[in-house]
Amino acid sequence: MADEFPFEISPMFEGERVRKDDMYVELAGPKSKGFELVSAVDIDEMEDGKFTLIGPDISDMEEGGRYPLAMIYRIAGELVEPDLEAIVERRNHDFQNYIQGVMHLNQRYDVWLRINKDSIAKGLNSFEDIAKATMMLFRNELPFIEKIDATYITDIEKVEDELAKAMERYAARDERTRNLHDEDVDTFYGCSLCQSFAPTSVCVITPDRIALCGAINWFDGRAAAKVDPEGPQFPIEKGELLDEIGGEYSGVNEVAQKLSGDEYNRIKIHSFFEFPHTSCGCFEVVGFYMPEVDGIGWVDRDYTGMAPNGLAFSTMAGQTGGGKQVIGFLGVGINYFRSPKFIQADGGWNRVVWMPKFLKDKVLADIPADIVDKVATEEDAQDLDTLKEFLKEKDHPVVKNWGADEEEEEDEESTGTSTAMPVFGMPDPAMLQNIPPMIGGGGGIKITLKNAKVSIDKIILSSKK
Ligand code: SF4
């Protein structure tokens, strides 16, 4: 495609993975620091195609090393406006994955890159090649960009300085949707970018639900659809409101059916259990239902420990991603925690029982005052037993459900029938088949179920003689 670069460039390399054994260097990612940022600037402020590197280049890096990386692009053009920044920024992911031997994952402050050994052997020794190839793709694919320049930073102190400024920019973008709600608009926006690796994924962006990658809000979707009508972001007419609490609209359902190739024909935007939004794999946070406490936990990419269900983010992300409606798991963007409609069909914050402290602190100001101390972190609960204890002690709203279950058991024992109702909507028992390896124990025995489907026809409760 372009002879001046020491690598091939093609969309066919998009799914290419760089595994640890093939990796020459790792950049940014969970064990280092980094980000990507696009800013709209005045056309006279910049020199088209200019590249600046601050810090060591690839040729200065050791094989197997891990380094910070910030990628800052400035764009200009008659049609370029700040509303387009997030949309252009999100395409950095696509375009860098077009480069053979380069793997780009995630977005914003979560970016994570790897360059493989073959590319280095073929002559890739400078970030300038990557930046220039990426800028070429930006200009070719997004013709409204008339000028673009790039600054890459690998010096850790400078990355940290610039990251703090970038975080302010991301927060300002997210803040814009605060006073706009789903009922205020007639049009939502869809995005098909992630269908390249999650073909049945249906991504719906509304004022009250940021995209699950966290990078595109309703304003961004609107700006992109306007400036590039043939591009991956497109309008979705809401149509008829079918379920106000769940957030179900006839227009979204029609698009879901079309976009998923008939795989799904219903999506409830604000539901965790019933026809939930699909999860592609780019989500910032994954939610997981814990039947043992009838509550929902959330874990983000930065959390490296185990959640109380005994699973790490990576395990649950593997279970959740792929563009499916996975009952019992849900991928979301961090800003969705700030939505007044946050999983409102399932109790909202009253159903949240656990999240890593770092994530909780990030959204602390948006957790309702009456629940904030009742949401456990890894400091309060490390497994299901300690979580149960914590929730009981704090009188978390889910505990009322346990009461209902206990009453139900008692009723069943005495009369053989049950009338007790849970406080929240309970998930369909069929969802249990989606819950991945649960680790349980007791009485000196540990049972690990892997990829198991358990079906129970009848439970008989009898007193121990
Ligand atoms: S998660 Fe959704 S909005 Fe974000 S890039 Fe993927 S398809 Fe687009």
Image (cartoon, rainbow, N blue to C red):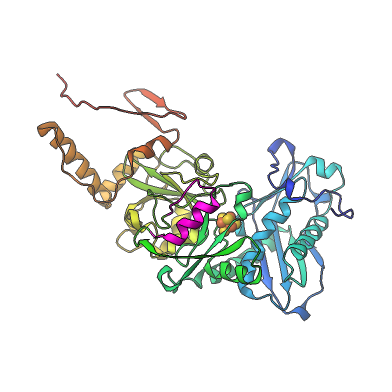
Residue 178 position, x and y percent, is: 45, 71
Q: Nearer the viewer, residue 261 or 329?
A: 261
Residue 235 in sight from this viewpoint: yes
Identify the residue shown where x is 37% and y is 28%: 454
Q: Inspect the magenta stretch and tell me whether residue 344 lies in it.
A: no
Q: Nearer the viewer, residue 152 or 213?
A: 213
Note whether 150 is above or below 271 in the view shown: below
Identify the residue shown where x is 86% and y is 55%: 2
Note whether 446 is above or below 2 in the view shown: above
Q: Inspect the magenta stretch and tell me whether residue 263 lies in it.
A: yes
Q: Is residue 292 left or right of residue 25?
A: left
Q: Is residue 154 left or right of residue 354?
A: right
Q: Quadrant of ligand 1?
A: bottom right
Q: Nearer the viewer, residue 82 or 417?
A: 417
Q: How many marks?
A: 0
Magenta residues span 247-267
Toward the top, the furthest residue is 465
Toward the left, the furthest residue is 414
Residue 211 position, x and y percent, is: 53, 59
Q: Image quarter for residue 117?
A: top right
